[in-house]
Amino acid sequence: MINLSLKRVTSVWIIAILVVFVITAIFGITMRFNQGGDIELSPVTFFSLMTAHGVTMVGIWSVAGMMAVNYLMARYVKVSTAVNVFALVLTVIGLVMLWTSTFVGYFHAGWTFLYPLPFFVAWESWATPLFLYSIAIFGIGWTVWTVAMLMQIYKKYSLAQSFAWQHFKRGYLVETPPFILITTVSLIGILICLITAVILLVLLFAEYYSNGTFTNDALLIKNLTYFFGHTIINEALYLGVATLYELFPEVSGRPKFKTTWYVALAWNCTLVFVLTAFFHHLYMDFVQPVGLQLVGQFASYFASLPSAAVTVFSIVILVYKNPIKWSLTNTLFFIGVIGWIIGGFGAVIDATISNNFVLHNTLWVPAHFHTYNAMGNVLFSLAFFYWVANEFAGTKVVPRSEKLRIGLLLIGGFGFVLMFYIAGAYSIPRRYSVYPDELALGRNLASYGGWFATIYVIAILLFLGEIVNKCLKVFSPRSSAAA
Amino acid sequence: MSKSIFSKIICCCLILSVVQFAQAQKGKFDFSEEKNVYNQIADVPVLTKDGTQKLSVLYSRSPLIVALIFTRCTGICSPLLLNLSEQISHLHTDPKENFKVLVISFDPRDQFEDMARMAKQYARENDPNWIFAVTPQISELTSSLAFNPVWDEDRQQLDHEALLSGINTDGYVTKNLIGLRDQQAIYSLIKSINNEFILSYPLPGNNNFLSCFSYDPSTGKKSWSWGMFLLVLPAIIAAGIVTILVNQKKTLHHN
Amino acid sequence: MSLQPKLLLIFLFTAGAIAITAWFIYSTSKLSSQEHGGMENPLRKRFTAFIILFALSAVFLSITIPKSPYFRFSGENPSHVVFIAAKQYNFIMSNQAIDPKKPGGGEDIVIPADELVEFRVTSLDVNHGFGIYDSRGEIVAQTQAMPGYVNRLRWRFITPGHYNIFCLEYCGNAHSFMRGSLTVTEAAAEK
Ligand code: HEM
Ligand SMILES: [Cu+2]
């Protein structure tokens, strides 16, 4: 049941996420213009912005997925508003701590805070623990939320049903909706990487408070770091895909998606392989056993290919030569899928060890993950925001500036990532505040990227106004009377 | 069907990694071991029980572990040989990985007879894999191995490092070991003279118990260490949580 | 053509194809009417598409895995060893082994072309990256520098010239300024 309190907390989430997104995207634009030489920041400011940008973006788009899934789940099972609010409060507290550590304390070890860099303090000494505690606060809020959602799923579905295993046989009684299947797979993945984050934080705190009597092994910590970091950003995207499965047919006026054996197989593959794909972050660490490197390449291919292929094909069959009621919601989903597979293809290129040898830690990396985030996951969430805002407002209007907004989004978004790809192919390193003269090409590309990103953010602002207005409707006295 | 193939591939890869990780962990490391890697050993004539031949004839037949000693040594020489002999006898080497041990004197006073006596002492006089030898061109040999014994006046002894040099079939030094080393180190020496390329090796750390694999030099055993366990732990904990959640449903159902 | 521009072209071509296909599919959804709707034989088409995709990735895997840097030059004897100790914010490079307790200033590195070099790379503080750039500013080879471990990177330089080393792992606020260099000379006449 979707009740008023769920609508209200969802509204707050949406407004908060969009506002924080625009601010954080402006951090990104600032970085790009600094790399382009258009403005001049100190390296410390640049890397503080970069650290805040990375953690905040990963955080808000993970919770955006969680929050959307939580809302839609209410169609199938009971959900707890209390836990939802709890997660919201902890996320806000965590964000305040995070930004304090990066902007007041100048903590700037990057969003992956790769050991032992956080302990080579080049900032206020309290900023390291504050940063780590902010991650811990996010972790607590989201873990509780994840477990609570899984609990509701398992009140209704058995273990086998939650993974749609009955679809591998003929003649089954209960159908698992694709939404439930994908949500379960993603939530379990998120749970696993949050537990990894706990282990990681415990090891780091152990070293921090041991006064030098305990030191960590850099290889182990790097494995744990990317287990957490890589996995969470991928699972966040899958949450967005879950909302797509639920809403895309519905708003297009087509029959609902059905779970079949290959849908079930694809997502079960994802569940397993996504957990070992992170090894591709260690390809250039020759100390990592070669066996794990090969597992990394294999898993990188088979974690994303089956589920992406199944999703794309389902959408193609649904759309091809069928009368579709196009609205902003399904258009955003549709573009999001394109962004996802283009970004995914960029990822597969880089997840190939022999290519990674020349692409590792170049701008190719931000290129591909910004493609499937800014032009994939963000659009999935935006589609949901737009849809739910209209639900809240009880409207079905097709606004006039639709073409404009989509056009700006496409030009700005793809232009922005294209500059990253070209720079990556020209060996421009990632995470450089400015580029050396030998790599001066990176400067022009960065400037262009900054301008494209500005166009993208303008498009987002055009959405933001309308969505926020409609979301605020759930707080009007009329809507509480209706409930 | 296809799933089981996947899992087999992954298992194979995992086993491979365990082996390689163990190789990466070679115990203590001395940076001066790296002094002359990939230099070529001097092709001096050596006198063995098969007569005089060029060193290149020996190493081109099979790679060598060269131990530089002298028979009058009261210091490190005999522990070095004893340890080497002991470790090798417990090794389960791959038949592919052939090698011979060349024990050669750097003391001009040593005659071949001294070396033959030494071979008897270590019960290796009939072992085809152990060659005891002397050479007339000691200084060429020692300098090509960056081995610098110094004369200690007080003890009337040559003072020197306990050095084992690995020579591959092209005559290159692929690896050195300094000091009395464990089986794992000897094994990696054998691998390297058989031209097996090991991509990486660890430096000595203050704390190794949280690395992915650990190797205990005192017992000579390697084990899965806590580190590797920590990488699978999250999935185990999550599985536990999900199991609890699944069972919770059933109890509710019955009530 | 080196690898990077090829990859960019493959990527742009594929992305373009995806975009055009998407546009085409999108446009069919507007023209059609309820009666003639839908794809013919979707099950067969989907099956074929999956088989093709699976075969393609299998081909990709089997072609690329053997080209992984771990297996290259592994059976050969390098004629030069260069030791690298990375630290915030420079690379100490030397032809001699570097004592981690007393790392010196290092020296200029000169390597003849066409000879196999082995770089032994480690870090004295945080993680760094050892990225070798040719004179056109293109990465030719790289490995990570991780504290506590020594990574061995083997490479054979073909083109003589000046090569820059840039740090390829974020290591702090002067990361963008961390650099080194080496020179590759003409191949020795004989050999
Ligand atoms: C218009 C929007 C955006 C702009 C302008 C932008 C810009 C940037 C820039 C300039 C960097 C640094 C690149 C470098 O390494 O040199 C960066 C890094 C990053 N961005 Fe974005 N970005 C945007 C959206 C996003 C989104 C939607 C995500 C979602 C997850 C995201 C996640 C990240 C992450 C994780 C990093 C890495 C930070 C690090 O290296 O520590 N960004 N972004
Ligand atoms: Cu560095």
Image: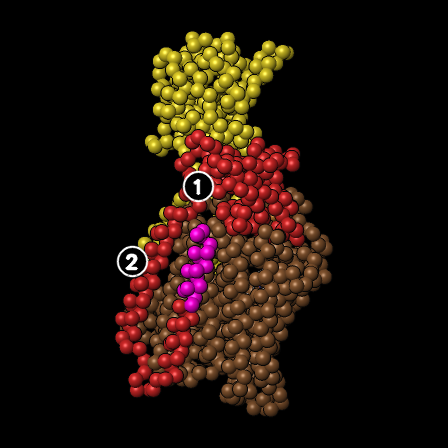
Task: Tell me what hue chain A is rendered in.
Answer: brown
Residue B67 rendering spot, x and y as whole percentages: 47, 21
Chain shaded yellow: B
Measured along the vertical axis of the image, is residue B82 above or below residue A320? above
Residue A27 rendering spot, x and y as whole percentages: 64, 66
> Dot 1: within a 10 Å radius of its alpha carbon, few (fewer than 14), some, or many (20 or more) residues?
many
Q: Is residue A296 left or right of residue A395?
A: left
Question: A68 or A99: nearer the eye?
Answer: A99
Q: Which one is in front in this view, the residue at disc 2 or the one at disc 1?
A: 1
Q: Chain of mark 2?
A: B
Instruction: Kindly identify the residue that appears in the image at 56 percent across and 50 percent down.
Output: C168
- Asked if residue C12 is among those painted magenta in the image, a careful observer would answer yes
Residue A388 rendering spot, x and y as whole percentages: 52, 81
Chain shaded red: C
Instruction: Kindly identify the residue that appears in the image at 38 percent across and 76 percent down.
Output: C24
Q: Quadrant of the C terminus of chain C?
A: top left
> Dot 2: within a 10 Å radius of its alpha carbon, few (fewer than 14), some, or many (20 or more) residues?
few
Q: Disc 2 marks which residue?
A: B1
Disc sitting over residue B20 in the figure:
1
Of the residues shown, which amino acid type is indicated by label 1?
A: Gln
Q: Chain of mark 1?
A: B
Q: Which residues are magenta?
A: C1-16
Q: Give the spatial CA distance, label 2 vs label 1.
A: 29 Å
